[in-house]
Structure formats: C-alpha cells, structure tokens
Image: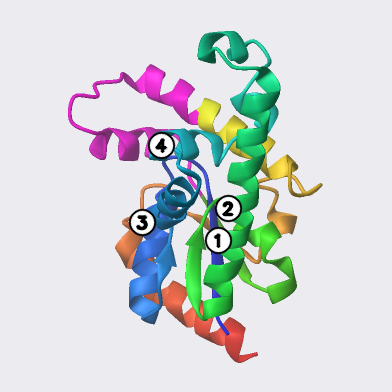
Amino acid sequence: MKIITISREFGSGGRELGKRLADALGIPCYDHEIIEMIAKENGFDERYVANVSEKSIEAAYPLTIGHRFAMPPMQIMDQSIRVATAQRKIIENFAEQGDCVIVGRCADVILADMKPLNLFVYADMPSKVQRCMERAPEGENLTANELERKIKQIDKQRTQHHQMYSDTKWGNKEGYHLCINTSGKEIKKLIPALVQFVNDWFDE
C-alpha cells in the first residue's frame, strides 16, 4: 500500500505538489477534506478548525483568549482536543482505505505504524514570498516583508503543533525519507521524477 505524507513549509508549494503527485499516481489526495470532515462531525466552523489543526493547543489558545470568547479557557481547550482527536481518527481512516497522499497535519507521525513515505517540501524565502504573492486571495495585498513575517509565524505554529505528536523536530531531515527543495522551480516539472521515486520506494 502506498501511503505518502507531505509536510511542508508555508509557501513552498507542498499542497500543489501533493495534489499533482496524487493525480499522477492515480490515488486520492486528502488536504482540506480533513478540515471539512472535522467541522461537520463536531459542529465547528471550518475556519475555526483550520486555525486549530496546525497549531499547538497552547499556541492556538492562550489562557487570556477565554475572556474574548466569553467562555472558560478549559472549555476552549476541550474543543481543541476534540479537533486533534477527530483529526487523528480521520487521517487513520483515510489511510486504512488504501493508497493516498495526505498533506500536513502530522500525518507522518500519526501513521508511523503504517510505514508511509514521508516527504518534506521546503524553499528559500524569496521563492516562498513570490509563490504566496502569485496565489494570494483576491483583495489580499501584503508586502514582501509582511508575507515573510506571515510565513515565519505559520511555520513556527507548525513546529509547535508537531511537538504535540512527536519528539522529532518538524523540518529536520532525519524525520523524512525525502526532502524536496522547490526554490525557483515549477512544481509540475518535479512530478515525473518524484513519481519514479515513489514507485521505486514502494517496490522495495
């Protein structure tokens, strides 16, 4: 069975790489679908789930946030734990269904017993800023400096979230089978070689 996980720096093109790789292999790619399912099953807003699903509980909800939400901090903490628990269950269920690519959300750690192929996608800062500018939602006009701060903040949150699941530091090469540098590259041009790598890996 081919289970492939994609961990990625924000702006590196990891989401696009995961989708293109899955399409080339003819297998499903799960990304935002995980958020949609968590939201539906728990009655949460999708934006809320997206906010929680890649942050540590502590980073997402400092104790003072309870005053802004007019509910006790522990109640918010309970909701965060519900999101994390649901996320784990959904990721495991997707993987048990068969071959797939799963983007983000600590799938590499959650599915460790299933021996997935774990990829890490990264890029230099100018490339990440440029990619974010090209894919910015309509109406978002952040400067290069603002985007760089946003990228660093999101990657910091991903590091903290990963620490909830594993002692291995997020982004360290020792935690992955292949690290892919997308700096200055068109993602689609990397896919044929990556497909060959995936097929060779699982053939062994």
* Mark 4 vs 1, N-terminal side: 4
* Mark 2 vs 4, N-terminal side: 4
The residue indicated by pointer 2 is 87
* Mark 3 vs 2, N-terminal side: 3
Magenta stretch, residue numbers:
122-151
Label 3: element kind? helix
* Mark 4 vs 3, N-terminal side: 3
Label annotation for residue 45? 4
Label 1: element kind? helix
Amino acid of disc 4:
Asp
Image position, residue 148 (x, y; %): 44, 25
Q: Which residue is drawn at 33% across and 73% down?
A: 23
Q: Which residue is drawn at 33% across and 36% down?
A: 132
Amino acid of disc 1:
Ile
Q: Seen in the image, is 126 located left or right of residue 186?
A: right
Q: Are marks 1 and 2 in contact (CB under 8 Å)?
A: yes
Within 10 Å of disc 3 (Cα), the crowding (few <14, some 14-19, many 20+) is: few
Nearest the viewer among 163 and 97 is: 97
